[in-house]
Amino acid sequence: MTVKIKSAGFTGIKGTLITVELDISRGLPSFNIVGLVDTSVKESKERVRSAIINSGFEFPMGRITVNLAPADLRKDGSLFDLPIAIGILAATEQINCLDIEKFLFMGELSLSGELVKVNGALPIVIEGIHNNISNFIVPIANSEECSIIKNSNVFPFDNLTQLSYFLKYRDMLPYKPKNYKSISIEPIDFDEILGQDSCKRAVEVAAAGSHNIILYGSPGSGKTMIAKRIPSILPDLDYDESLEVTKIYSVSGNLGKDGLITQRPFRNPHHTSSQISLVGGGSKLLPGEISLAHNGVLYLDELLEFKRNVIEVLRQPLEDRSIKISKYCGNVVYPANFMLVASLNPCPCGFWGSKEKSCTCTEHERKRYMNKLSGPFMDRIDIFTSIQNISYDEINIRKTAESSSTIKERVEKARKIQKLRFKNYNLSCNSEMTPGLVKKHCKLTSQCSEMMEKVYNKFHFSVRAYMKILKVSRTIADLNEHKNIETNDLLEAIQYRKLINEEIS
Ligand SMILES: [Zn+2]
């Protein structure tokens, strides 16, 4: 007897419907799975056999052939355990298979028959809904993420036995999501940082236009404290952005028990991170830190401690806002539209230019240290700001600082202007402008143009750096509610660029 069970897999962050065809015929006992499957699917045989027997069912004698169709699509993962087991139980009439084609099954099985959480459940549900499938049978640990999608009827189960009862009696209503609002574990706010006004202003500009920023200063000056607070001034994620972030966390197995992710990600990989952990890949083609930071902040603390090849590999995703990973087992494209925030010590000892301590490095050592940053990488940075240790007096005089919510209001206002500006294009921030859009929206007055020419020649800016200055000055003008870029907007933007040229070269 042949049965067909609906299931699905995923490539990148996109789900693909898969039909599990199962045939049991007479002959010597055998169990084969075909259809371009990798080893993780092949291992499924042992789990399915044990799970069926340990749940009190009979494992059939005979030739069992499982075909995962379409055959030309590579499948990996253990989520086909459940549809295969259901196929065997249906083919041997051990479960009620009335209307079974109305359900999509996914789940890994433990040897004792429990349903174990799988990765990628969210993109699978989305693909199912697109194909008019609305009933999903999933492990209980996947229930929150699957019920994010409207019109999906999610039926979560603990084990195979429970599921067989449901198929027999249909005695359950779809799962209702808890709908709780996730709260920040560590409420952090800019009002905890006294002083550092110029650095905070630079960060505000960066947040307003989603510009990449480098914080430059000696150890202990508070670079990490400031970087960590950047998500608190970024606008809230809208539903589509949240969904995209959640999909990435779903396929990478980072979702935990939560449903929709509503907070902007802040990723802080260690400087010993490998290229693969940063950009993604490996045998399973999983997303890396740059994709986990999508729609949020990627913070690289002590940028120059990272290996040079790791820094350089960021150049392409910084430009394209996505990353393509190619391997013998296939290609995937993950979104990687993040705001890069990096901190930098001015020299190997960290105290060059500091008021408190004197630097012990030679000029040669310092140059060599800074040379680790290539020109093309620096061209992808929009804002460069230095940060100084604040003096004791400053702490005493200033008792309060502006809160994150006040800064966020200004950022949101500037973002609104940008959204309106780019409503006919597939972009939302000034930093994403193409050269054509820069030309259209960053027109300079003759006075600004004259000023630009002078600094361009003086500092030998590259064309890319020139474009960055225009984009940043557009953001500053938006923050200042100026229709056109004015002299002081441009001056501030040049200031953020000038520092790069002065310090690095
Ligand atoms: Zn030094």
Image (cartoon, rainbow, N blue to C red):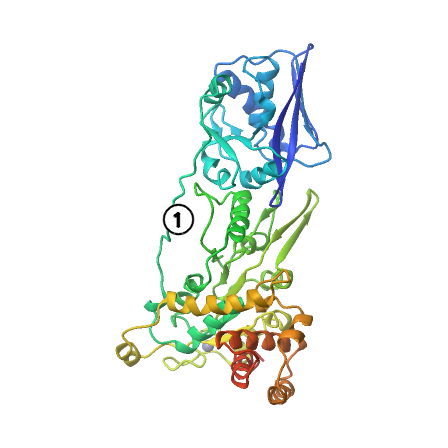
Location of residue 505 with respect to 373 vertically, above or below: below
**Pick the front one: 458 or 4:** 4
Location of residue 500 with respect to 322 vertically, above or below: below
Outermost right residue: 72
The number of numbered discs placed on residues in the rendered structure image is 1
Quadrant in which the C terminus appears: bottom right
**Pick the front one: 86 or 324:** 86
Q: Residue at x 53, y 69 (%)?
A: 417
Residue 4: x, y in percent? 65, 23
Q: Residue at x 68, y 37 (%)?
A: 74
Name the secondary structure under disc 1: loop
Location of residue 423 with respect to 37 vertically, above or below: below
Q: Is mark 1 within 8 Å of ligand 1?
A: no
The residue carrying pointer 1 sits among few (fewer than 14), some (14 to 19) or many (20 or more) residues within 10 Å by Cα, namely: few
Residue 332: x, y in percent? 66, 47
Q: Is residue 149 visible?
A: yes
Q: Is residue 240 left or right of residue 68?
A: left
Residue 324: x, y in percent? 66, 53
Tag 1: residue type?
Answer: Ser
Q: Is residue 347 visible?
A: no
Q: Residue at x 44, y 61 (%)?
A: 231
Quadrant in which the N terminus appears: top right
Circle 1 residue: 182
Q: Residue at x 43, y 78 (%)?
A: 198
Residue 271: x, y in percent? 50, 60
